[in-house]
Amino acid sequence: QVQLVESGGGSVQAGGSLRLSCAVSGVTYSNICMAWFRQAPGKERERVASIDGYGRTTYADSVEDRFTISGDNAKNTLYLQMNSLKPEDTATYYCATSVSWLCPTVYNYWGQGTQVTVSS
C-alpha cells in the first residue's frame, strides 16, 4: 500500500526558505514519477514540480529557479526545497504519485498536505 506523508511546512517571512519532505512507503520513489502540488484557498490545485523515473524534473513557471525537487534514496523520501519565498506561495502543499515511470496527468496517491504560509 502506497503511503505519502508530508512534513516541513510552517510560517516564514517573504524571502525565507523552507524544505518540505514527503516520506514514501509501499513503493520506491526513485523508480516512479513523484510530484509536488499546492492549493491555495479559492484557487485550483497547481502542480509545482515533478520528477520522473529518469530523474527528469519539471517546474511551474511561478517557482522556476526558486524551488528544487529532489530525493534521498536511502530514506525513500522526496523533498521540495523552497527559496526566496513569496506571499503568493502560501498554500497547502501535497506530494503525489501515480506509481508510473513517466509523469501522468492524473495522480492516484496523495499525502495529507502540509501548510506553508509566507508573510510579507
Image (tube, rainbow, N blue to C red):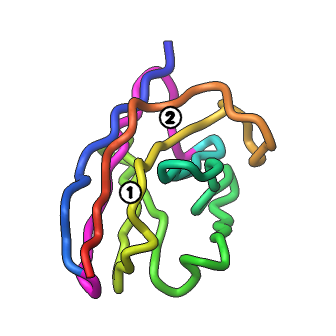
Q: Quadrant of residue 86?
A: bottom left
Which dot marks residue 58?
none
Viewport quadrant of the C terminus: bottom left
Q: Alpha-carbon neighbours of circle 1 within 10 Å: few (<14), some, or many (≥20)? A: many
Instruction: Please give the range of residues in magenta.
Output: 14-30
Q: Alpha-carbon neighbours of circle 2 within 10 Å: few (<14), some, or many (≥20)? A: some
Q: Is residue 54 left or right of residue 89?
A: right
Rendered location of residue 64, percent (x, y): 58, 81
Queried whether the magenta region covers residue 29, the answer comes back as yes
Which badge, 1 or 2, is on the more N-terminal residue? 2
Rendered location of residue 12, percent (x, y): 19, 71
Between residue 55 and residue 46, name the one nearer to us. Answer: 46
Queried whether the magenta region covers residue 75, the answer comes back as no
From mark 1 to mark 2, how far is it between C-alphas? 14 Å
Q: Quadrant of residue 57?
A: bottom right
Q: Is residue 54 above or below residue 3?
A: below
Q: Is residue 82 left or right of residue 64?
A: left
Between residue 63 and residue 53, name the one nearer to us. Answer: 63
* Residue for badge 1: 79
Q: Amino acid at mark 1?
A: Tyr
Closest to the camera, between mark 1 and mark 2, is: 1
Mark 1: which secondary structure? strand
Residue positioned most to the front: 42
Q: Residue at x 42, y 55 (%)?
A: 91
Q: Amino acid at mark 2?
A: Thr
Q: Is residue 36 above or below residue 19?
A: above
* Residue for badge 2: 28
Between residue 111 and residue 76, name the one nearer to us. Answer: 111
Rendered location of residue 73, percent (x, y): 40, 49
Q: Quadrant of residue 58?
A: bottom right
Q: Residue at x 46, y 43 (%)?
A: 94
Mark 2: which secondary structure? loop
